[in-house]
Image (cartoon, helix red, strand yellow):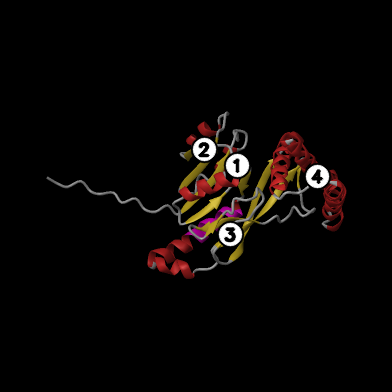
Amino acid sequence: MASTPILIMSKPLISVALATHNEEKNLSMCLDSVKDWVDEIIIADGESTDQTISIAKKYDAKVIKTTNKANFHINKQIAMDEAKGLIVLQLDADEVVDKKMAKFIKEKAKEISTIEKKDSRDIKNYQPKAWNLRRRNFFLGRFLTKGGQYPDPVIRLYINGFARLPQKDVHEQMDVNGNIEFAKGHLLHYSNPSFTDYLRKFNTYTSFKAMQLKEEKIPFNAVSMIEYLLIKPISTFVSLYIRHKGFQDGLAGFVFALMSGIYWKISYLKLWELYERKN
């Protein structure tokens, strides 16, 4: 009697890791940009109540159900920890990988795979260990080109095992054990397709910042009021709109700089609210 052959599953080459919460409007757009060339999709979902999980399963994604945390980078790391690929691409659900970047990632994965198959120990000597990805941010009907919003580099592509998120802030970069270079191509970031979407996220981010200020024991007094209600808002606006030439993006550039300054005011007022609740 012939023996049954043993099937040996090869190690995934490219993994995509995401954290989601109610992303039914964005998720298909994101996964459509990677589905044809990645080997696995890992999603850590934070208590979505819409169709996010159903959409994820249509793409054969592995879904890890967890809580919806204020610092969603904790959930990103959960997904990253589950990734088995030789290289990992960490995305947000509102990001799209353009064709030039997809080509770069596939070529880089093939190069690293060749080295790993020859001698896995050589990966330790390979550089870089991670790549900055340039982002084009969509705001009020256009991609911003100034105001500090381009190229907006984010470390999102790395050789598995050589990068982690600190999980301390929602705007942090990965800690990388090795060199970092720039990838070719762009991430198209549709985080704010409407001003309503922007305000929803603005509310989330200012609440998180208020909690950080409380943890830092920022006092609610005359000195801090001047700093957070006057100095920081004005300096932020001037920096983005004048120094970084946000005015070249027209109305979108003005509104972005204005709201970036107001961010400090709202965060500080929410800090006051946290102190009032305590009392």
**Horizontally, is 263 left or right of 92 in the view?**
right
Upstream in sequence: badge 1 or badge 4: 1
Residue under label 4: 220
Label 3 Cα neighbours within 10 Å, binned few <14 / some 14-19 / many ≥20? few
* Disc 3 from disc 2: Cα separation: 23 Å
Q: Residue at x 20, y 46 (%)?
A: 4
Q: Position of residue 116 (x, y in %)?
A: 42, 64
Q: Quadrant of residue 132?
A: bottom right
* Disc 1 from disc 4: Cα separation: 36 Å
Question: What segment carries the magenta color?
Answer: 100-109
Question: What is the secondary structure assignment of the residue under circle 2?
Answer: strand
Residue under label 2: 66
Q: Residue at x 42, y 52 (%)?
A: 12
- The residue mark sitting in front, 1 or 4, is 4
Rendered image: mark on residue 175: 3
Residue under label 1: 93
Amino acid at pointer 1: Ala
Q: Residue at x 51, y 46 (%)?
A: 78
Q: Residue at x 75, y 33 (%)?
A: 196
Q: Please report contact status of discs 1 and 4: CB closer than 8 Å, yes or no.
A: no
**Horizontally, is 46 left or right of 261 in the view?**
left
